[in-house]
Amino acid sequence: MRAGHREREDRKSASFNQDKHHALIDETRGTSEPLASWLAVTFEIAGELNRAALESALLLLVRRHHVLRCEFQRILGDLSYAVHRPGDIELEAVEMGGFDTPQEVRAFLFDSFQKDIDTMAWPPYTMGAVVRDGGSTTVYLAFDHIVSDGMSMPNVVRDVQLAYAAHCRGGDPDLPDAGSYMDFAREQRHGYVSIGADDDRLAYWRTFIARNGGIFPRFPLDLGVEPGRLYPAVNKTATLLDDHRAEALDARCREAGGKPFMGLLAAVAVALREEGGPDLYRALMPLSERGRGAWRHSLGWFVNTLPIEFSVARELDFAQIIAGVRDGFTTMMGSIDVPFVRAWELLAPEHFTGRCWPFPVNFVSYIDMRKCPGAEHHPRWRPTAHVWVSRVNGTTSWFQRDSAGLHINSIYADTPQAHRTMARLHRTLRETLLAMAERLPESTAPEVLTG
């Protein structure tokens, strides 16, 4: 992408998430352990590629979404942005040559993402297509986290696919309105930039900190990491349940008065307990702030993070655990508007300027792709999301539900102990989910042996 002059307008402040992310990347740049992260999505286009239509669709995506036209700059400590006008954005297509094997393609893409995606430069994203002999094409787009989140990826796929189809027909795409993430950022900062640590809206955070002993819930299993040290990241993906068993678990959760994701949280908590964790589950949980209104179809970092806690004591049955998850989630949602970054800065300032969280944190995310815009086309488009971070000091797990089942993507520190711990935890989690889906007592799940 190329752009001309920026709009003549006053610079505006970025969101709390963007500010924290930018500061962290800037602080570690030039060190032996630079930090970076990106989110990517791939999807399929059947038949012979109409190159002009695809180029027009990709250009429309950038012109359509305000956040993709923002160029960030830190001035007097504040991260602000200026915006390129839609008409000044141009797409420059470059032929990258041929590749003989899928391994060569993957290596090229990974290297391109590392070189071309930069938090500190515009554009902080890259895009392209792999055209195969025989008439099929994989389109890829990768974004620095500063302009996107996991829920942005389905919107990217839907926008490009519908625009491509319309341009192939010689028409214009009929896309829903997409509100500006930067408008969301402005509203958020207006409401929370001036609050203090004693503000009533932080009451949930303060009570959690008092019970937990700090703002971060610790990942309760041994990963073999040293305090304050960052490690190369391992990225593992696996299917936990096929669609039939996932539907069975969904039904059981509804019968118990909960939602399907509550069954997943219950299973994660039970699996951790079985592996030596506590009876009281505590974790940070990212939540979408898009709602169903102006930002449902937008790109941006619409994610807040809140702590959840509930009991998985052995004497509780499935319905009682689900009730605890439901109550914990309901209580947590009362503070959904309070930005995590702001709560962190005010209530744990001793950790706010660090390059990483002080120890491995229990962090679990869930997305139901079947509820995303364009989901009815996913079997044909075959979208696949990808997450990458450069270095970590703990573990993070993202769970995804789609028409094929329930899947997990975990990133964790590359240590021998972390490999053993996470492999065993994933096996125990799968057996726990199977037992819950098949209505077996969780204690009767087959014994899990480490390899």
Image (spheres, rainbow, N blue to C red):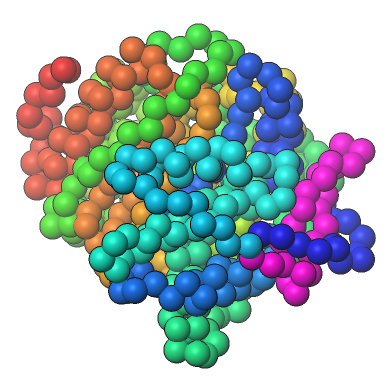
The residue under the point 51% across, 25% down is 392
Seen from the viewer's position, the closer of residues 242 and 211 is 242
Q: Nearer the viewer, residue 150 or 105?
A: 105
* Residue 399 placement (x, y as % from top left): 35, 45
x and y percent of residue 265 in the render?
Answer: 33, 42
Q: Is residue 45 left or right of residue 68?
A: left
Q: Is residue 165 above or below residue 115?
A: below
The image shows residue 114 at horizontal and vertical percentages of 55, 37
Residue 237 figure quarter: top left
Q: Is residue 268 above or below residue 449?
A: below
From the viewer's perspective, is 193 left or right of 347?
right
Residue sitting at x 60%, y 73%: 60
Q: Is residue 416 above or below residue 318?
A: above
Task: Work out which quarter of the rendered image holds the C terminus and state it.
Answer: top left
**Which segment is the magenta one?**
69-91
Side of 325 relative to 155 (left or right): left
Between 223 and 123, the residue placed more toward the observer is 123
- Report the side of 398 relative to 197 (left or right): left
Q: Main secondary structure of the magenta part?
A: strand
Q: Is residue 413 above or below residue 146?
A: above
Magenta residue check for 340: no
Q: Is residue 64 visible?
A: yes
Does any portion of residue 360 appear in the rendered image? Answer: no
Mark count:
0
Q: Quadrant of residue 248?
A: bottom left
Residue 259 in picture, x, y percent from top left: 32, 57
Q: What residue is at 69 percent from the left and 31 percent from the top?
A: 24
Which quadrant of the figure contains the N terminus? bottom right
Can you name the residue that lies furthest to the front here? 97
